[in-house]
Image: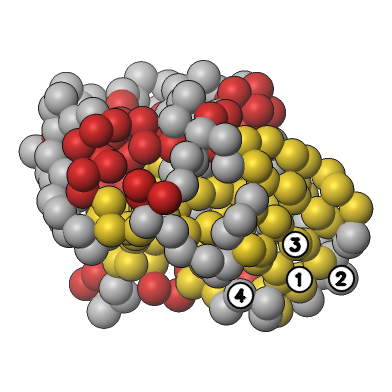
Amino acid sequence: MSTLSKETIQELAAHLESAELEAREVTKITDDYPDMDYEDAFDIQWEIRRRKEERGTRIVGLKMGLTSWAKMKQMGVEKPCYGFLADYFSCPEGGEIDTSGLIHPKVEAEIAFVTKKVLRGPGCSIADVMAATDFIVPAVEIIDSRYKDFKFDIKSVIADNSSSSRFITGGQMALPQDVDTTTLGVVLEKNGEIVETAAGAAVLGHPAASVAMLANMFGERGEEIPAGTFIMTGGVTAAVAVEAGDSINVRYHALGSISARFV
Ligand code: OOG
Ligand code: MG
């Protein structure tokens, strides 16, 4: 059930997308549209995606968010969300990330899956995800909510493409049968100091459960996840604020590390 008109969905998508492109803070949209529902929120996100694709931007992956208790507690939102990844979000491993195009970036350590078969909900399970996984690869997400002070509720954040902004992949890939992602230890360092640690099970008990949930959420809209999709499963720890001058390094048990410098 949606409550907003098609025109309002389009206006809000344009509003949030320009805030993203211009790195400009806005107030959360539920302040002005308190009655908007989940379908409205996802309609706005899908409209932002459509706008980007229409201009020739490629969609290079998907992400789940708010899948660990650490993240839910940090943001005060106890429900997972998803978003899409645009081509220009992708940043090189070990490289520089330009903060001038960002508002108030935060770093998240994540475990990503790349699929080799289509995933379709409802009823998608961890086993379905494992059978459809080509490989698992470390990832770091740089989120950047367009909302003032990084404060939002679940509907506002979904409309804002779940704060998606930049991401990095690196380290070593692994076959799904060769790695237990639940005990995969992750160590997040900022400027040479350990700031967060966790294991993969922090993400919904099993990172593959996050991919299954994504397939099931897509299923609610009649969408499927195509084969060959890169999917980030959500931060395993709370997100860490960064600014120009900071460096981060994330180590993944037996899967190498990812680093970046913010300039
Ligand atoms: C929403 C996006 C969360 C994650 O990995 O949990 C997210 C936010 O916290 O701004 O990407
Ligand atoms: Mg994330």
Q: Amino acid at mark 3?
A: Asn
Q: Work out whether mark 3 precedes mark 4 in sequence or the reverse, and give the earlier one.
A: 4
Residue visible at 57% across and 35% down? 183
Q: Secondary structure at mark 1?
A: strand
Inter-mark Cα distance, 4 to 2:
17 Å
Residue bearing mark 1: 262
> Could you tell me residue 243's position as x and y percent?
80, 62
Q: Secondary structure at mark 2?
A: loop
> Could you tell me residue 41's position as x and y percent?
33, 35
- From this view, report whether residue 54 is shown above or below residue 64: below
User: Can the viewer see residue 161 in this picture?
Assistant: no
Label 4 near ligand 2 (CB < 8 Å): no
Q: Amino acid at mark 2?
A: Gly
**Between residues 204 and 72, which one lies in front from this camera angle?**
204
Tell whether 110 sits left or right of 116: right
Tell whether 126 sits left or right of 73: left
Q: Amino acid at mark 4?
A: Glu
Q: Work out whether mark 2 precedes mark 1 in sequence or the reverse, and give the earlier one.
A: 2
Inter-mark Cα distance, 3 to 4:
10 Å
Q: Which mark is residue 249?
A: 3
Q: Work out whether mark 3 precedes mark 1 in sequence or the reverse, and give the earlier one.
A: 3
Quarter holding residue 69: top right
Q: Secondary structure at mark 3?
A: strand
Residue bearing mark 4: 93
Q: Which mark is residue 29?
A: none
Q: Amino acid at mark 1?
A: Phe
Residues under numbered marks 2 and 1 in contact, where contact means CB atoms less than 8 Å apart: yes
Residue bearing mark 2: 245
Residue visible at 16% across and 44% down? 119
